[in-house]
Structure formats: structure tokens, C-alpha cells
Image (cartoon, rainbow, N blue to C red):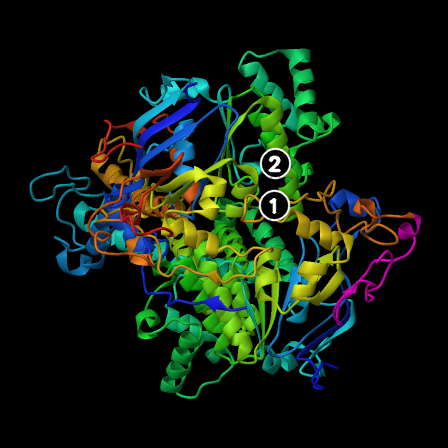
Amino acid sequence: MSSLLEIQDLHVWFDLEDGGELHAVKGVDLLLDPGERLGLVGESGCGKTTTALAVMGLLPPSASVSGRILLDGKEILAGGVETIRPHRWVDLAIVFQGAMNALNPVQTVGSQIVEAIELHGLGKGLEARNQTGALLESVGIPAKRAERFPHELSGGMRQRAAIAMALSCNPKVLIADEPTTALDVMVQAQILELLDALCRDFGLALILVTHDLPVVAQVCDRGAVMYAGEIVERGSVETLYHTPRHPYTRLLFEATPDLGDTGEVVSIPGAPPRLDRPIAGCPFQPRCDRAFEPCPTIHPGLKMVGDGHAAACHLNDVPAVTSL
Amino acid sequence: MSVALREPGAVIESEPIRSRRGLVWDTIRRRPSALAGAVILSIVILGALLAPWIAPYDLHKQVGPVFGAPSRSHPLGLDDGGIDMVTLLMWGARVSLLVGFAATLVSMVIGGTVGLLAGYFGGKTDTVLMRITDYFLVIPDVPLMIVVAAIWGPSLFHIIIVIGILLWTSTARVLRAQVKSVRELVYVKRARSLGASHTRIVLRHVLPQVAPLLIASTVLTIAVAIFDETALAFLGLGDPSRISLGKMIENAFQRAAISTGAWWAIVPPGVLVALIILACSLIGGALEDALNPRLRVAHLSARSFRLRPLVGRGEEAV
Amino acid sequence: MSTNGRRPLLEVEELVVRYPISRSFVGSHARRPQRTVHAVDGVTLTVEGGELLALVGESGCGKTTTAQAVLRLVDTEAGSIRFEGRDITGLGARELRPIRRRMQLVYQDPYESLDPRLRVRATVEEPLLVHGLGGSKADREERVREALVKAELSPPELFLDRYPHELSGGQRQRVAIAAGLVLEPRLLVADEPVSMLDVSVRAGILGLLEGLKRQGLGILMITHDLSTAARFADRIAVMYLGRIVEEGPADEIVENAQHPYTRALLSVVPRRDPRDRRQPQILQGETPDAIAIPPGCRFHPRCPLVIEDCKAIDPSLERPAAARTPGHRAACIRV
């Protein structure tokens, strides 16, 4: 079975005001099977949101993109936004942090969903309204709230409404960009539970973009860790936690406090490298606690280190090293 | 419960410069419209300032016939008194600019203070000051000027005061809005919670933040002030003892320049006024644009992201 | 009285903060009843020197308002605030000034809390200038350097002349902390000090606070993140709709929470270990507005343990039956 969504060698550059370029995404490869949940994890500036926007064709005019994006085996990036746009909402949908960005404040919630349904020719009039009602119920919003304006709903409700809108045209892939970051922990739990149920019931594939490792651990099957525009490790969420093969992955877990763990909490000194200049060697090397001889000069590529597990670290080439 | 601590390190991040220092200078340098406006304005101001020394002829001496046509020695001809137009333009610009700048100063001081106090203190102060502003806003300017000229007499000083009183309201409103939002900035609130005095906060935190907007507003007000002065003079309400650009136009009109075909007596002063106003508008507009990112509509452009050829990889793909 | 017999640094008793919702033009003329937000509805807490108390809760629970009230940035309707033994509740601005020196606030947003036009030196120096402290310019410079070193920005020369935009988020937050430390306060109120920072940087800042705490500083930390509170706080107080519903030593609260709200919160916090998937107790709905507080126990509409009495009785903080340490209290009639 071929993958539902395949991203190959994706690069994104942004034009800078002084004439230079920011290389925000550097050769990202991702595979997503139907119904699979992938977590795209990283801190600010790592390129995870840019990757998500690239897939949706939502990058601004200041961006240049190269690579291949295959949906059901079909190339959709080759013609730029023209070839991606037809797939928006119908195959690929996105939910952002702060749902107010997605919802029109002067239209009722219901009418926005109806509009989406009618625009994509999936129903009209009464049929569209019925679909909307069913959709709202499936995200936990009583159907009669369809007549409310976004500002009349609470934060959690708005996020649910944004999810409903994203699902209005039965997409195959849902990309959620920091969907719960601005929400309280209880509401976050509700939304995550909702996403979990929707993926099961609708057979949705999910790409969850977030900086929050525990959320990925709870919701996703697989994870990809990004740093400085590159994927530095990829594998199942269990593998990433129990046997990380990249120091950044390990350190990121160690930097996250956990209720069930009494271990040390560390911080990683320094800051990510500038992306407007070429980087020699491994991008994480200046901050790495295990850097050794090849790291400052030779760039480590992403290599398989186990079943479905890949990491970009020179330490994996050293047979004597058993744990990172 | 221990924490593994490492030195934070002095790594400077790749964040873009978000500071607004040098915004005014930057804008003028970067935007062609502002640069053009600055150049034009500089030339005019320089010419006006140096008029006593570089004007080609004497201001009061008749050097030719009434409405003498343009010639080699008088590129813009002569006015209704036989005086060289170029000379007149330079001296006239002096007066126009003087009135423009002085009136703007008056309006900036009043409007700036009102806007600052209203925006910073809010509450009753704000309400009262805004009511006053509204009252001034609805005063019709031309009738007021006529009345003042009739009662007080049309001296330059009175003109300046009148124009200043008419123009301060828009500055007050714009400034009030900005001061209100600056007041909510976290570091301003922090200074308050520290116990800093109002004076300190205004001088150190608020003023520097609203200064660019104040400058933009000032420049735009200059344009309006000069226009108002020109209009006043044209209507005969200007100071009869001084030659301003508007007065020049009025004179020419009165002395039937049009029917005699002496376009050089009317057009040049009008063009010069228009140029000055244009220059100010260009600078002020560019500053406003630079200050308000929401005015930029890049996201509405029809262009989209661009494609590049595949990069490919040196090592094995995973 | 605190355990060692001395007065606590900060004592808050039955604090009440309310504010009216401004009515619309029509509303006030139609004489609609004035609605008030009961932001803080009777909060009692103490902070000792050398201790970190985490005030935990979801948005709207009143934790931020409590912090603002403690710093006398908002007016209180009832209750008392004692700082270093002295009642500061009703003091005017002038009398508060010397007291303000000894309690400082660290804001959540390191990107907004520093004036972008001032260099680090000027930002950290400002509190000294405002309060007229520090003698000569050289003396002030010395104190600024000391504060920067205390905030682990060392060597200070590297940072003194920088502008905020040249620093990372973590460094900016340290500058903000240094500006808070330069007056040598006794109490630090930290409002979500790390929530806007990257994960890899948070532990550094929290570790800094911990180090300061060990030197005797009392810290009141506002946070919504239970995991952070569990790791770095000595005591935790959980707030809901303007009241503290449970409080106690951090370890005790995390391992042996008794109040149903606390237990639910702890159960839904995601864990790092994918295999550690416990059954989350997800409460229905969202926290109601602090305008219409439910009668009886304010949590009863969402409580999984609710019984008939809960709708009538408003419980006070008492030691629960299953508490394992002294100082553990919960406001629930069922525990």
C-alpha cells in the first residue's frame, strides 16, 4: 500500500529584506499512511509550521519551494499553488492555533461551514445545513449553536468549530498546527480526545505540529523531530522516548518536566543556528553534549538505525556507542 | 530535586531587528516616494532660507514692465508690479513656509499635549479633552478665519494662531490612540508597577514610542497649514504687508493676469505650493505606511510562492 | 505562624477582588442589574522566605488577579494582605513605594516586557533610578552588574550594551529577572515565567529561580502547567473560580491529591512516556464565568463525585481524611 501523503526533499527559502535568504526547511522527507498519526515536533524556528504550510500551499509570496509532494501517488507541488489549491479542504485540511484566525468574525459558525460545503459542490441548501449540523455534533458542538458568531463561543468551542470546518469536505489528511497550545489543560484534553475519536471514526490521517512532546506521546503513533529546518530523528513515539538515537531528541525529553518522573530537568545551552547562512557540519553540534570529531565539519544525513527508525547523528556510525 | 544547569551562553539569535530606532531616517532612505519628497522639500526650504542672499533681484525694485513676459534674464517673467518672479517666489516661499511651520508648531504643541494627556490618563481627563476636541473639530475653518481677520486684523501672527487652532484636533486624536495602546504595553505597565512617576514613564517610554507617529503627523500637518495659508491669502485675508505664495496668486488674480495671458504670474506660485504639499504628503504618507504594518496588503497580492528545481541529496535518501 | 516561628513573608487572608462589567449604553439605561466578575472570592495563602509557592489553575480561576492584588496593582474589596508583617491592603501610593522595592514582578512575555529602545544596562538600572537608590553612577553600574550575574548572564560585559532584539527569549527573561533583582527584593512574583519560552530553555530559568529561592527569596509563581509546578514548587495551591480548592506540599499534591478537580487536572496532563497512558478524567464543558458562580460548592456542576449536599454547602479548606502530610488541605465535603 503506497503512502497517502509523501513529502520528498522539501526545501523552503524565505526572501529577507536585506536581499539574503532564510533557508527555513532543508530537505524534509515524510511519509504518512492512511489513518496514521504523525507528530511533527520541534521548538520555535525549527521549520515545522513552514513545512505544514508548504504542504497546504499556504506559503507567502516571499517564499520559494522545491521538492515533491505526492498525494495518493500524484505530484501536487509541480505547478505551485495552482496544483495544490484544488486539494485544499477536499483532501488536505489544516487547523491552526487560535481558531479565531480561521473563523470569520462576522459570519455565524454554521454559515461558514455551509459555505465551505457548497463551494466544493458537496451539497446545497438544506442538505448542506444538515451536513453542517451533523458535523458540529460530531465535534461536540450542539447543532443549534450553528447560529452563533465565533466571539460568542468559548475558546474550546471555537477550536472545535475550526476543526469542524476543516472536516467539512471530508479530507483524508488533517494537519493540526499547535491546536491546543493556547488552551487550558482540561480543554486541551477534550480537544485531543476529539481528534483521536475523529481520526478513528473518519479514518483520518493526522499530522500534529507542536512543540509539546507529551502531547505527541499521547496522541500520535509516530514522531519526527525537527531542528534548524531538518528532520533529525524519526520513528515510533515509543522508540523516540525509550531509545532516542539523536542527542537533541534525548535532551528535549529531558528538558520536559513530567508528573510521573522524579528525574532531573535539563536545559540546553545556547540557541539554534541562524538559517540565513550556510551551516557547516551538524546544526546541533554547538549545543550537543556528545559532539565529537566529525560533527563540526561533516553534515550527518538521516540514516536508518532500526526498524522504521532513522536519525541524523554521527554517533550512530560508531559501533561501540550503544545509547545516546 | 536538582537541576542540571549549564551556562546560557552568549549566542546571538537570528531574530530580525524589530526595533523602531531610526525609523524615520530609515524610511526616508528606503522608500523612493519619501526620498523624492525629502529632496523636493529640502530644495524649497534651502531656496527660501537663502533668499536674502541668492535671490537674483531686489524684491521691491521694478525691473521691467507690468506682467513682463519670461525672458532670458527673467525666466519666470515679472509680476503685476514689474518685479522678478523668481525673486518673488523665493521670498514668497519664505513667508508661506514660515506660516506653515509656525502654525504647525502651535498645533503640534496643543494637539500633542491634549492627545498625550487624554491617551495616558484616560477616564475623565480623556472624556473632557475629547469633548473639547470635538467642539474644535466642527468649527468651519474659512468662516472662522474671516471672522478673526475681520475682528483682529489680518496680521501674520493672527493667521498663524488661527491655522494652529484649526489643525490640532487630528493630531490629538491620532496621538491619543497611539498613546493608549503604548500605555498597555507590558514594559510600560512594568514601569508603573515599579512605582515610576508619570513624568518618567511618559518621557522615557511613551514619547519615544509615539515619536515617529508624531513626526509623520507633523509633516502632514505642515502640508495642510501651508494650504490653509495659501487659501487665506488668496481670499484676501492674508497679511497685506507680506508676500506669500497665496498672496502672489491673489495679486495676479486681482490685476487680471488671466485676461492678459500672464500665466507666469499665477502658475508658478500655485505649482510651488502644490510641490511643497506634495513633498510633505509623500514623506508623511511613507512614514505612516512604515509605522502601520497593517496597512500593507502584501497578503492580498495575487502572487504566490515560487518554485525551484529539486535540490537533491549527496547521501542516500531515507 | 510559619513552622520556624517567624512570620511568613506574605500573608493573604480572605482576599476578595471584584470588578464590574461595564454595561452597554442600552444596558445601563435599561437598568439591567450590574454584573460583577468575582475574580478572587476569598483566598487565603502564605509565602515564606526561601519557599516557592505555585498558584495553579486554568484561565479565569483568579490566579493572575491574586498576584496583581498582592502587588497592590488592583484594588481589593475585602480581605487583607500582610507583607513582612505589615498590613499593606489600604496603603496609598506614597506609602507603598518603599514596600514596592521589596516585592517585584516578573512577567510572562519576555518579548514585550523589555523596552526595545533601551539597552540592557538602562533596563536593569531603571528601578534604581525610579527609587532614587544606588548613589553614584558607578555604584549603580556595580549593582546592575551584580544583578546580571545573579541572573546568570555572565560575564555581564557581554550583555550590558545589547538591545533586547539581540537577545534570545531566555536571555531576555533573565534580563527581566535581573531588573527585578536589582532592588534586592524579598518576594518575587513570577507570572508564567517560562510559558512563552522554548522547552529547552525553561529549566534554566526555573533553575535560576530555584537558586534564588535557596538564597532566601520568597517566590509566588503563577502557572497553568502542573508538571512545572510539581517539579519546582515547594507547595502548590490549586485555584478554581476564585478560590483555592486544594493546597499542600508539592509532592503530596501530585501523588495524593484529594479534591476531585485536582485529581481530574492531574489525570489529563499528558506524560512523556507513550506507554504511560492512564485513563484521563476529562471533565465536561468548560469553567463557567466568574460572573455567575454556582451555589454551594462552586465546582459541583462538573464534579464526578457530586451529591445532593454539594449544591447547598460551600466547603472550606480542611485537612482531608487521606492526607499524608500536615499542611494538606482541600475544600470538599466528600474527602
For disc 2, the chain is A
Disc 2 designates what residue?
Answer: A159
From this view, report whether residue C11 is shown above or below residue B138.
below
- What residue is shown at x 56% (from left), y 26% (from top)? A166
Q: Nearer the viewer, residue C94 or A134?
A: A134
Label 1 and label 2: CA atoms lie apart by 9 Å
Report crowding for label 2: few under 14, some 14 to 19, many 20 or more residues within 10 A (C-alpha): many
Q: Can residue B162 be seen in this view?
A: no
Q: Which of A238 and A275 is in front in this view?
A: A238
Q: Is mark 2 on a helix, strand or loop?
A: helix
State the quadrant of the N terminus of chain A: top left
* B33 sits left or right of B225 in the view: left
User: Which of pointers 1 and 2 lies earlier in the amino acid sequence?
Assistant: 2
* C138 sits left or right of A126 in the view: left
Q: Position of residue B312 (x, y in %)?
A: 23, 30
From this view, report whether residue C247 is shown above or below residue A38.
below
Report crowding for label 1: few under 14, some 14 to 19, many 20 or more residues within 10 A (C-alpha): some
State which region is magenta. Answer: C308-335
Name the image quarter holding residue B4: bottom left
* B305 sits left or right of C330 in the view: left
Q: Which mark is residue A183?
A: 1
